[in-house]
Amino acid sequence: MSRKFNLLRVMGVLAAVLIIGAAAIWFSGVIPTKPSRPPQNSILVITPYRYNGTWVFDDARFGLVREPFVGGVPAMIDVLVANIPDAHKGFRMTFSAKPFPAYQKKLTWVRGDMDGNYYKIDDPPMEGWLCPAMFKYYDKAPPELYVKADPLPPI
């Protein structure tokens, strides 16, 4: 007894195989579901600026808009940018969990608190709280952060 070729049945089986395969790929993590973090040894750059009396920054990769620095960190930034004219309009902040050439300040982890982390600098002695947005860049709070502030290049 011969069976007739049934295009509709073949298409149905093919669709089921494709759906199962796509689900397996999705759940295996091959297709990312959220923006990936930069590698932990990267040198990273953000562009802070003053807004409503405090330092903030944007990072479209992670949906951060006017993300504020609070809890002592604005005073630390003021120290970093003391010699940058018009820093309030924006400056380049380079940071890394590893030392890099010409970094200005080393921030040392002090303690975790309220889903964020306190860091200190030694000169001048200051302490500030970095909010959970830091975890957009690092899996866990680095024991040290190295930072440098530079003027923005002319446009």
Image (cartoon, helix red, strand yellow):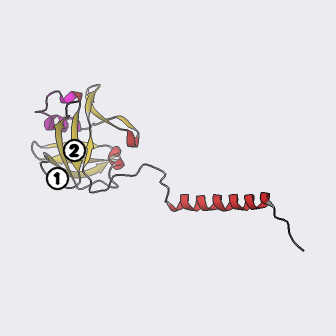
Q: Quadrant of the rendered structure where residue 151 is?
A: top left
Q: Which residue shows up at 14% across the image and 46% down it? A: 105
Image spot of residue 52 (x, y percent): 29, 25
Q: Is residue 25 visible?
A: yes
Q: Which residue shows up at 87% across the image and 72% down it? A: 2
Q: Quadrant of the rendered structure where residue 140 is?
A: bottom left
Residue to which mark 1 is pinned: 100
| Residue 82 belongs to the span the image colors magenta | yes
**In the orientation shown, which residue stands out farthest toward the bottom?**
1
Residue at mark 2 to residue at mark 1: CA–CA distance = 10 Å
Question: What is the three-letter code of the residue carrying label 1?
Answer: Phe
Locate the N terminus by quadrant. bottom right
Locate the C terminus by quadrant. top left
Question: What is the three-letter code of the residue carrying label 2?
Answer: Thr
Q: Quadrant of the rendered structure where residue 153 is?
A: top left
| In the image: residue 114, left or right of residue 98 | right
Residue 94 badge: 2
Secondary structure, mark 2, is strand
Image spot of residue 73 (x, y percent): 22, 39
Q: Is residue 149 above or below residue 107?
A: above
Magenta part of the chain: 72-88
